[in-house]
Amino acid sequence: MMIHGRGRVTAGLMIALSITQACGAGWHRPPQLTPGPLPARQQVQLWQHDHVLRWHAVTLTPDSVIGVPFVLPVNCDSCRLSVPRSTVDSIRLGSPTAGFWRTFGLVSGLAVAAFMIVCATGGGGPPCSK
């Protein structure tokens, strides 16, 4: 079955959308977390029942998790919060900033590739002229 005209554009957009979904924050559950500080800018999701906290500048102790809410500066000592580790259902680590830049790069690369394909097939008009 051949796809023509709008169907081709729609299929291309669907493929691009599917690819960009792969560029998320990379949230993952680490296999094991040992007590001690995590890198200051490491983003952490703490899940407690149906509630999630998003922190950075996190330190793990044997009985608690201490960190700064993500919207506050990492060096804000008066902003530090603590929750008992026994109340935390799961901890996930991720990097939404890196995910943003991966997505930006992918979308930019797809736009350049689409422009090159249009120009190579002769359908680009003046911007593709030599």
Image: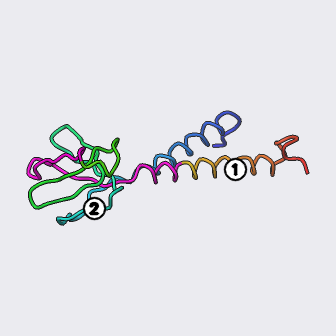
Q: Mark 1 = which residue? A: 112
**Residue under the image location 88 percent in, 41 percent down:** 126
Graded by Cα atoms within 10 Å as few (under 14), some (14 to 19) or many (20 or more), the crowding at tag 1 reads few
Query: Which three-letter amino acid code belongs to the residue tagged 2?
Result: Leu
Local secondary structure at mark 2: loop
Q: Residue at x 71, y 35 (%)?
A: 5
Q: Which mark is residue 38?
A: 2
Q: Nearer the viewer, residue 1 or 101?
A: 101
User: Would residue 8 be found to the left or right of residue 69 on screen?
Assistant: right
Number of labelled discs? Answer: 2
Question: What residue appears at the point 86 percent right and 40 percent down from the top-left corner?
Answer: 125
Dot 1: element: helix
Q: Which mark is residue 43?
A: none
Residue 109, percent across and down? 64, 52
Residue 100 falls inside the magenta stretch: yes
Kind of residue at disc 1? Val
Q: Please name whichever residue, 9 or 25, is drawn nearer the observer in this view of the structure.
A: 25
Residue 31 placement, left or right of 5: left
Image coordinates of residue 20 in percent, x first then y, are 51, 47
Which of label 2 and label 1 is nearer to you? 2
Q: Residue furthest right?
A: 130
Task: Name which of mark 2 and mark 1 comes first in the sequence.
Answer: 2
Looking at the image, the residue that sits furthest to the top is: 6
Q: Identify the magenta region.
A: 78-103
Q: On the rendered structure, is 13 left or right of 117?
A: left
